[in-house]
Each structure stands twice: as C-alpha cells, then as structure tokens.
Amino acid sequence: MNDLSPKERLLRVLSNQTVDRAPVICPGGMMNSATVDVIEGLGLSFPKVHPDAEAMTRLSSAVEEKTGFENFGIPYCMTVEAEVLGSEIDFGTPVCEPKIAKERYASAADVEVRDVKQLVREGRVEAIARAGQTIAEKNPDVPVIGSLTGPISTAASIVDPMTFLKELRKDKTNAHRVLDYVTDFLVAYAGVLIESGFPVITIADPTATGEILGPKMFGDYAVPYINRLVDAIHGRGAKAIVHICGRLDSVKKHIPTLHGDAVSTDAMVNLKALKAETGIPVVMGNVSTFALQLQEPETIRKVTEKLVEDGIDIISPACGLSTKTPVGNIAAMTEVVKDR
Amino acid sequence: MTREEELHKGLSEAVVDMDEDLAKELAQAVVDEGFDAYEAIDKGLSAGMEEVGRLYEEEEYFIPELLLCSDAMYAGIEILKPHIKKREDAVRHTVVIGVVEGDTHDIGKNLVKIMLESAGFNVIDLGRDIPAVEFVKAAEEHHAEIIALATLMTTAMPAMREVLEVLEKEAKRGNFKVVVGGGPISPAFAEKIGADVYAVNAAEAARLARELVA
Ligand code: B12
C-alpha cells in the first residue's frame, strides 16, 4: 500500500496520525547520505558542492533517486553553523566530510554576541535555503528536511570543546550566555529554512549525549536549549525531529521531556522498548550505520524488517553514515520498507 | 597517619573533588615541608586520578567532571614537577598521541592523554586530523617510545593503517611501539595493521602502555 505521498506520510506520522506504512528517510546534516557512491557520475564533486545551491539541488535529487529515501536532506555536514559563527572550516575531500579546523574561541567568556539577523545572511545559509526552495517547488510531494547541528554541538564547535565541557560546570554564566546566543542563531536559521519551504527540521546534537554529559548536565543544558529551538520551529508551523546519539540509559528520564515530534536514536537503543518505557509517541531509527557500511544487503534487509515489524514509526539510518557506505545497502533498506 | 600520608590523601581527594585550589595548596605544602615530590604525585595526585577513572567507568562522573579532576591534577603536578629529585629508576617515557587524518573526534583521545599523563608518561599531543607522516616525524623528534593512534570513524581507519605503512617503508617500525584505539577499532584490526596493542578505554591504554615500557 502506498496511498499517501511521501510528504503527507511523514507529516502525518510527525502529527501522530495514522498512515499506510512507515516513511523511510534520512535527514542529512550529521546523518548525511550523499555518499561517494551517490555523487559518482553526476559531474559534481566534494567539497565543491557544499556552498553551491545548484549543485546541492542536483545532488539531493540524486540521493533521493539512488537510495530510495523519501525525502531530500540538506546540508551534508555539521559545519554550516560554526562557519557562520566564526570557526575555521576544512571543507574536506571527496571521501571526508567538512570538519572544524579550529574553533573560533578559547573559552565561553571570549564569545562576542553578534546580531543573528545579520548572521543568517552569511556563510552557506542562503545557498542551503535556495537549494531547498528549488527542490521543494519541483517536488511538492516529497518533504525537504533541513538538518541543524544542535546547540551544545554548535557551542562546542565555536569554543574549544574541552574547555566548553568544563565550563558547563565551572563558568555556568558564560556557558548559558553562549548557548543562548547559539540557540538564537539556530532559531533564526531554522526560520529562514522554514520560510523557504522546508516543512521539517532535524536537530542532531552528538556532543550532548548522555555518555558525554551525564544525566544532570543533559537535563540542565541539552534539554532546555533543544526545546527552545523545537518550540520556535513549531511556532513557525514546521515539524521537528530530535536525534540523540549514543546509549540512552543514563538520560532516559529526560527523553519524554523533549518537545520534538519524533525522537531518533542510535542502533544500540531498542526503540520498541524505549517507546513502551517512556511513552513517547513517535520514534525514528535505527538501522546501524556500521552494518550499512560493512554488511551485505541481505543482512540489511533483515535488520530493517525487524524494525518494521516492531512498529517503528519512521525508518532511518541510526546515526551518521560513513561516506563509503555502498548505495546498494541503502537501497536494500528503503526497498524493504516500501514493499511492505 | 603520618603528615606525609595526610598530604597524599588530601591531594588525592582534591583531585576527586575537582578542587584545583586545594590541590595547589597541598602541593605547595609538600614542597615547603620538604617531602618527596615524586611520591606526592604518585601516591596523591595519580592515585586520585585513578579513583576518578573508576568513578567514570561506574558512570558517577562524566566527561566534564573528569576534565575538571584532571585540571586539579595538572595544577598540583605543575608545582611539584620542578622538585622531583632525579632518580635512576624514574626515566620518563614519551608517547606521541593524536587522532588520525580525516577525523576530528578528539574527546576520547584527550581522556587517553590524561590517563597516560597521570600514569607518569610524557605525552606529546599532536591534536586531531593528523597526517601519517606527522606522527613519525614527531615521534623521532621527541624520542618517543610509543605512538598512540585514535579514530572514531570507519572512513579514517585506512589513515591509521597508513601510519604503520610509513613506519615500515622507512624501516622504522622497530623503533616504536604502536597503540591503537577508538570506537570502530578492534583487536583484530589492530593485529591486521600490525599495531602492538589495542586498548578499549583510557584506563586500559595507560595500563598497557606501562607494560610496553616496563
Ligand atoms: C561527540 C560526537 C561528535 C562531535 C565530536 C566533538 C569532539 N570534539 O570530539 C561532533 C559533533 C563534532 C561530531 C562530528 C561528526 N561525527 Co560524530 N560522534 C560523536 C559521538 C556521539 C560521541 C563520541 C565521543 O566523544 N564519545 C565519548 C568518548 C569519551 O568516547 P570515545 O571517543 O569512544 O573514547 C573512548 C574509547 O574509544 C577509547 N579511545 C579513544 N581514543 C583512543 C585512542 C587510543 C590510542 C586508545 C588506546 C583508546 C582510545 O578510550 C576512550 C575513553 O575511555 C559518536 C558516537 C559514539 N557513541 O561514539 C559519533 C560518531 C563518532 N560520529 C560520527 C560521524 C559520522 C560524524 C561526522 C562525520 C558527521 C557528519 N556527517 O559530518 C562528523 C565528523 C567530521 C569529521 N570528518 O571529523 C559517526 C562515525 C560513523 C562511522 N562510520 O565511522 C559516529 C560513530 C556516530 C554514529 N554511530 O554514526 N561527532
């Protein structure tokens, strides 16, 4: 049964309404699926694609076509925010994603707050918005997802990460000041994307995992800023997916307090059990990205089938994909979901 | 408990309590009262850091706490270091550590560095996203005995192998022990690329590194 358009299906799931089957998506950003296999033959190349709206339009269309994911996902890395906020970016190579070469500030106290209205005119923000707008206009039935780097990860990409993690305890005033600023910027950036026709925003915040922060810091810092961002996204009429990396054991009690329309997790989390335990209505995940890279399509099919049987609401890769993931494995995953 | 034992205990507790000021104060007391500086690092600060490692494994402490504890340890070491009496048996072994090219995940590497330092190693930290030749160059320059390589990304695993290839090619493999670790690395992979040791976490990395130079 494939009665709904991919966009209707995803939006219905995110509103906790009934659907014919689960959508199978990959939001981009941290969870980028514009792999080496996908870009081949397009006459495009990394890292040249990243700031180029026209190239992104073509690449994201190719991702949708070749992988079978029922969405477009941009950008393809986690450095857009940090670039605008002043960090030095290394745009990577054909096999390596863009990465932070050097954080802008040595400590939270050094961060100078700039006007976020001006910031959203800088860096790659406009190119990303334009790419999404073009794709959305050409493909009204397929959702375009904008992927943001979460507040803590962005903060720890503009302030030296080790120092910033310490300052969460040692200099709470400045830690909050930086997170306020970063969140204001993310709200403005999300606003630009939503205005350009992105109906769904995904927030991934790897540095804010339970394993790194522990339950107290996760509750004090990760939850409130992510929620402020989600509330602002809702205020603009879009949906929000929140991805939490790593094991959830130490932070499980906080998961139901997240305001996102869906919670996405890594492969070690049993999503069916998480739903039962926490009562959160919509979960997304979680085909192991290591399996996607290293196993055979047959194994991927089995793993995906299990998730479908478990009633997982949105099927997706569990976390960040390797750029060397074979496209055949991704296609195997999406076929299983669509054939049900 | 003797006065010296009291100071050791105090130093250890200052580390566990993330109390940088107290660590400095007690380290200064060790110096002023003429006690052995090396003993104070070993039985005080390092012992405290070992306890911190245990609290981290038990999920009592997380990364921010661990980093603050290590700051207290470093503050104490800073004061004690100039007063360490040269001893025949106390040769400082040097480790060159870094995250291999293509990967910028460095939180785990930094923990390994801290545990190596608290175990008495002299650690040269190259940082993250480091080309293979840089490891070899630095190891020679600093007369290191151990090269420690980290990656959390499968796509950077070939870059880890490359370090060993450079060592082989330049006929320098015998000059260094190579320790590897990070999420996707396994004992099998370590063996395949010809590394000497795989360690699953920072505490084990320090323990195994000590065995390597024993
Ligand atoms: C935090 C994080 C980030 C942060 C990193 C911040 C920083 N400064 O380090 C940010 C947000 C920047 C980030 C970025 C990216 N990330 Co990331 N990230 C993580 C995450 C969630 C946690 C890592 C962590 O710090 N853990 C805490 C530390 C303490 O643990 P640890 O590193 O494992 O270290 C322990 C042991 O491994 C060992 N150890 C570590 N190093 C060494 C070294 C030696 C010598 C030894 C002996 C032992 C040892 O001891 C340590 C302590 O005991 C992991 C997922 C995970 N659960 O591991 C993903 C993960 C590593 N990231 C991933 C990805 C894909 C990315 C990106 C490519 C995303 C993108 N699309 O752009 C980028 C990286 C770009 C690049 N090329 O560098 C993937 C990699 C997948 C793969 N196939 O390899 C992972 C595995 C997530 C996943 N499941 O998909 N990420």
Image: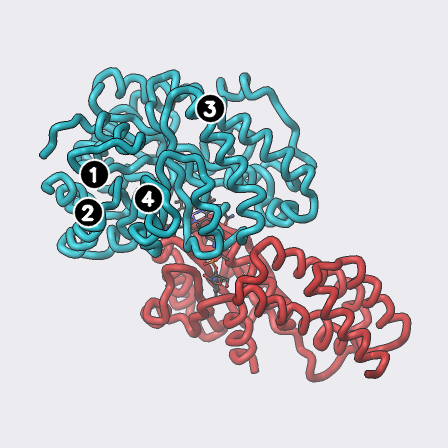
Chain colours: A cyan, B red
| Mark 2 or mark 3, whichever is nearer to me | 2
Residue A183, image quadrant: top right
Mark 4 secondary-structure assignment: loop
> Which amino acid, by three-letter code, is at mark 2?
Val
Question: What's the CA distance linking mark 1 and mark 4?
Answer: 31 Å
Residue B44 location (% of width, % of height)? 73, 73
For the point 64% across and 49% down, the residue is A166
Who comes first in sequence, dot 1 or dot 3? 1
State yes or no: discs 2 and 1 in contact (Cβ < 8 Å).
Answer: yes
Who comes first in sequence, dot 4 or dot 3? 4
Q: Which residue is mark 1?
A: A22
Residue B96: tell me if it is visible: no
Residue A308: which disc? Answer: 2
Question: What's the CA distance linking mark 2 and mark 4?
Answer: 31 Å
Residue A189: which disc? Answer: 3
| Mark 1 or mark 4, whichever is nearer to me | 1
Label 1 in the same subunit as label 4: yes
Mark 2 secondary-structure assignment: helix
Label 1 in the same subunit as label 3: yes
> Which amino acid, by three-letter code, is at mark 4?
Val
For the point 43% across and 74% down, the residue is B196
Q: Which residue is mark 4?
A: A95
> Which amino acid, by three-letter code, is at mark 1?
Ala
Residue B113, image quadrant: bottom right
